[in-house]
Image (cartoon, rainbow, N blue to C red):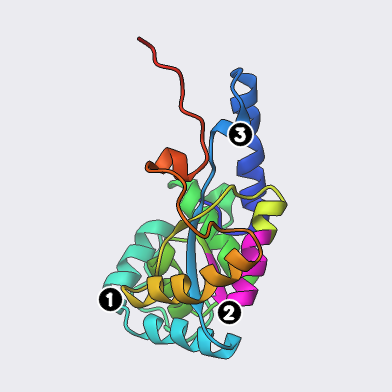
Amino acid sequence: MAYDLPSAQEYYGDVKARIRRAGRDPGSVAIMPGLVTYVGSTEEEARAKQNELDALLPTAESLQQLGLFTEQDCTDWDLDAPVPDLPPLEEFTGPKGRYATILRIIESERPTVRQLLGRLAAGGGHCTMVGTPEQIADRIAEWQEQGGADGFNLMPPSLPGGVEDFVDHVVPVLQKRGLFRSEYEARTLRGHLGLPRPPSAH
């Protein structure tokens, strides 16, 4: 899972190198991390949408899930206080991937418990972009230009609104910049991604 650009670049570079070492064309494999977006006409409006959805979380169940991820008893954590200190990664005895992402979110965003629960509920810790269509398009372009992704799997935080916001407002900006197709040129997912069809084994 790619929470931020540095972690995405590390994963992208590692996978592309493995593909190359296996004698395959790295361009024949598309790396498309998950992407959660909150889109607004201003950054403040986008953050308000994020906060509104965070407030709808079933807190007891969300805290229980966070406890599973962190191996902590989170049941009495103050939702609107900063996340309490957690053990460093090297001391954690459970699955380290998601725990490492949680630590990165806490370190870089300093969220409240409620905000952390929202981040995990919306995309499980995948990349989250909050802002205007132009700001989100800027970050998408940055990830693609700097070796973090070949594309993205959209993970809308709400349906149908989250999809509509992205399609109606972000996609046109990407199209103007030449970063998204204006019409389909193929009939399969492989074709839409521009990936070559492998030769038949028969």
Q: Secondary structure at mark 1?
A: helix
Look at the picture and state if 67 lies above or below 13. Answer: below
Identify the residue at horizontal 66%, vertical 30% (top origin): 17
Q: Quadrant of the C terminus?
A: top left
Q: Which residue is mark 3?
A: 27
Residue 110 is at least partly visible in this image: no
Is 97 included in the stretch rendered in magenta?
no
Look at the picture and state if 13 lies above or below 112. Answer: above
Q: Secondary structure at mark 2?
A: strand
Name the spot of residue 6 as percent of width and height, x first.
68, 53
Name the spot of residue 153 as percent of width and height, x first.
45, 55
Q: Residues within 10 Å of mark 2 (few under 14, many from 20)?
A: some
Identify the residue at horizontal 45%, vertical 85% (top origin): 49
Name the spot of residue 195 as percent of width and height, x first.
51, 35
Residues drawn in magenta: 128-141
Look at the picture and state if 29 lies above or below 136. Answer: above
Residue 88 numbered tag: none
